[in-house]
Amino acid sequence: MKSIVQDRYGAAPEEVLRLAETVTPAMGPDEVLVRVHAASVDRGTWHAMAGLPYPVRTAGFGLRRPKISNPGRSLAGTVEAVGADVTGVDPGDEVFGIGGGAFAEYACVRPGKLSLKPANLSFGQAAAVPVSGLTALQAVRDQGRVRAGQSVLIVGASGGVGTFAVQIAKAYGAEVTAVCSASKADMVRAIGAERCIDYVREDFADGRDRYDVILDIGGNRRLSHLRRALTPKGRLVIVGGETDGRWLGGIDRQLRAHLLSPFVGQKLGTFIASENAADLVAIREIIESGKVTPVIDRTYPLSEVAAAVRHLLDGRTRGKLVITI
Ligand SMILES: NC(=O)c1ccc[n+]([C@@H]2O[C@H](COP(=O)([O-])OP(=O)(O)OC[C@H]3O[C@@H](n4cnc5c(N)ncnc54)[C@H](OP(=O)(O)O)[C@@H]3O)[C@@H](O)[C@H]2O)c1
């Protein structure tokens, strides 16, 4: 089969990712073999590709070189075969989910990370959902505990996670203020944000406005600044934020939030998204209700995964980048 392959870690996609002919992965008894029709790129693709920050390597990706030589994870496709121990999934099912080696014609996926594809989405749209959509859902619903009528500030609203978070927060009845670059503000307004703040020209943390919930997906503002923009009993959820730090890569800020939280009135927290079928079903239902639609910036063929990752690194992406296979 055709697959993207990487033999070593490296920060430049053009230098480490190549298209190759490989054997179809051998499915275990507790796995599902999916004929992949589309996959998608997210920040995690780069982290897995680069092996950075270093804690990524100790989290199962391989210490010296990548354990799985293909950094794709979010996918959509058709079930080709089902392992002997798997129930509830049948060959021919149209599915979406999270599996290692998604930038390939076939991938093995555990049924606990797979669900039926939203009926109203193409495979390309569905492949945009799993990692970014689940992260946004859990940030809004579980960590932010967003309720109708609350004011929610979403920092990094124009990216992969952010475009889902804006729509999901709206679906929960919140009033959304988005922080993103000026060139992407129209798109972010179109998916539901009441107001957009250009982080280059305006400071959302100048203390003039306070929000019940802040989802910090990008930007790396200091905790003290974020707290200034939060109501006295508000909730801050640190989802991510890129730094050049090879060792911690922003994890230190997340740890500080976690440690400080018990001593202040505000709830400061962070989380690692849980990849599970129940939440894939939950987001499928929100999508099928028409309240959330993936925002697709561009679609690339399998041979151009490196170009897609480069586009993401350049900060030009609006929503998601999809790979068709
Ligand atoms: N906790 C978890 O389990 C989890 C799961 C998935 C992802 N993440 C993390 O979440 C982060 C976002 O991932 P993603 O896939 O959504 O990335 P992405 O698509 O590249 O989006 C990045 C976002 O950050 C914004 N941004 C960049 N610089 C900013 C600044 N100075 N101030 C405010 N916003 C700024 C960008 O806005 P413009 O493009 O408009 O400039 C864009 O909206 C990453 O750090 C990723 O590792 C965490």
Image: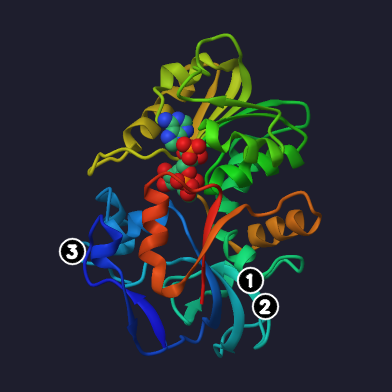
Disc 3 designates what residue?
64
Q: Is residue 81 visible?
A: yes
Q: How is the image coloured?
A: rainbow
* Disc ID at residue 299: none
Give the residue at the far front of this rendering: 183
Q: Please, what secondary structure does the residue beneath circle 1 have?
A: helix
Say which residue label 1 marks.
Answer: 123
Where residue 7 sits in the image (x, y, percent)? 23, 72
Whether 287 is drawn above or below 305: the answer is above
241 relative to 87, above or below: above
Disc 1 or 2, which lies upstream in sequence? 2
Q: Is residue 290 left or right of residue 322?
A: right
Amino acid of disc 1: Phe
Q: Left or right: where does residue 159 sit relative to residue 249?
A: right
SS at mark 3 in the image: loop
**Mark 1–mark 2 contact, CB under 8 Å?**
yes
- Specify the amino acid type for callout 2: Glu
Placement of 234 over or under 220, stated as above or below: above
Which residue was labeled with disc 2? Answer: 94
Residue at horizontal 48%, vertical 21%? 226
Q: Residue at x 52, y 81 (%)?
A: 30
Q: Quadrant of residue 147?
A: top right
Mark 1 packing: few (<14 Cα in 10 Å), some, or many (20+)? many
Q: Amino acid at mark 3?
A: Arg
Closer to the camera: disc 1 or disc 3? 1
Q: Which is closer to the viewer, label 1 or label 2?
A: 1
Other residues around mark 2 within 10 Å, as few (<14) / some (14–19) / many (≥20): many
Q: Quadrant where the N terminus lies?
A: bottom left
Residue drawn at point x = 54 percent, y = 54 percent: 320
